[in-house]
Image (cartoon, helix red, strand yellow):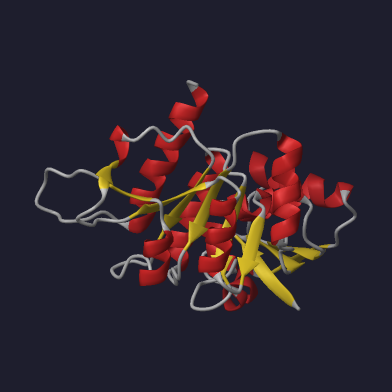
Amino acid sequence: MTELLYGRNAVRECLRARRRYIHKLLLAKETKLTPLIREVVEQAKTLHIPIQRIPRQKLDKLSSGHQGIALEVGRLPTVNLQDLLSHLDKLGQSPFLLAIDHLEDPQNVGALLRTAEAVGVHGVILPARRSVGITPTVVKVSAGASEHLRIVIVSNLVQTLKSFKKAGVWVIGVEKAASAQPYHRVDLNMPLILVVGSEGKGMTRLVSETCDLLLEIPMQGHIASLNVSVAGGLVMYEAWRVRQNS
């Protein structure tokens, strides 16, 4: 099955990561050869990927927001849980993972993946059902960061989290709740999985009950909550900060 990745950063990172089968590069005839576009074209030539120049109107029909460039590709390979565990063993580092619980908005998922890659998250866990996959929109919003991440799709998120808990990994949820602690008052320099839930509903009940700890973002303004990708991003950066300073 093929899909169309679009957007300059998404296309560039797909070529850099080399994790997908790439059928061809589509370039609008009207696209200016900026340094980034030249880099993409040269990379495609190096990898012997066919390059097809087409009218912008034709590319418009294939995708919106393409920025004059797109890649026809196969699906992004995911890893299984055992592969992720083996990778963590080889790293010799304290696990730093992100789990996304039934979040169906590609904008939020893409933003979370972009931050996760930026702070060096070792892997991302997604449930197989009621969750957006790694769609072209997610890839574009993530600026191609998703192409570099190890992504695991699991059939039962609760059981997966419990397995990590048995292995000594803390499961920490990001959610506004009566029992939640301010995120900056908890030392996150530990083996951990950060869990974020859907916009509005938050984490599912069983996932929330599985968490060892809940964290919230203290707020002073009139707005009661933050966008899930912003809240998740703040906690991911806090975890990265304390790990860097340890």
Could you say where residue 235 lies in the image, as x and y percent from the top left? Answer: 38, 42
Single out the residue that lies furthest toward the right: 48
Q: Nearer the viewer, residue 191 or 126?
A: 191
Which residue sits at x=53%, y=52%?
A: 165
Q: Nearer the viewer, residue 183 or 70?
A: 183
Q: Is residue 16 above or below residue 157?
A: above
Single out the residue that lies furthest toward the front: 166
- Asked if residue 181 lies left or right of residue 39, the reply is left
Could you say where residue 191 lies in the image, as x and y percent from the top left? Answer: 54, 40
Q: Is residue 11 visible?
A: yes
- Asked if residue 189 lies left or right of residue 156, the reply is left
Q: Nearer the viewer, residue 47 or 121?
A: 121
Q: Nearer the viewer, residue 229 or 84?
A: 84
Which residue sits at x=74%, y=63%?
A: 77
Which residue sits at x=77%, y=55%?
A: 19
- Asked if residue 236 lies left or right of residue 48, the reply is left
Report the quarter where the N terminus lies.
Answer: bottom right
Which residue sits at x=50%, y=73%?
A: 131
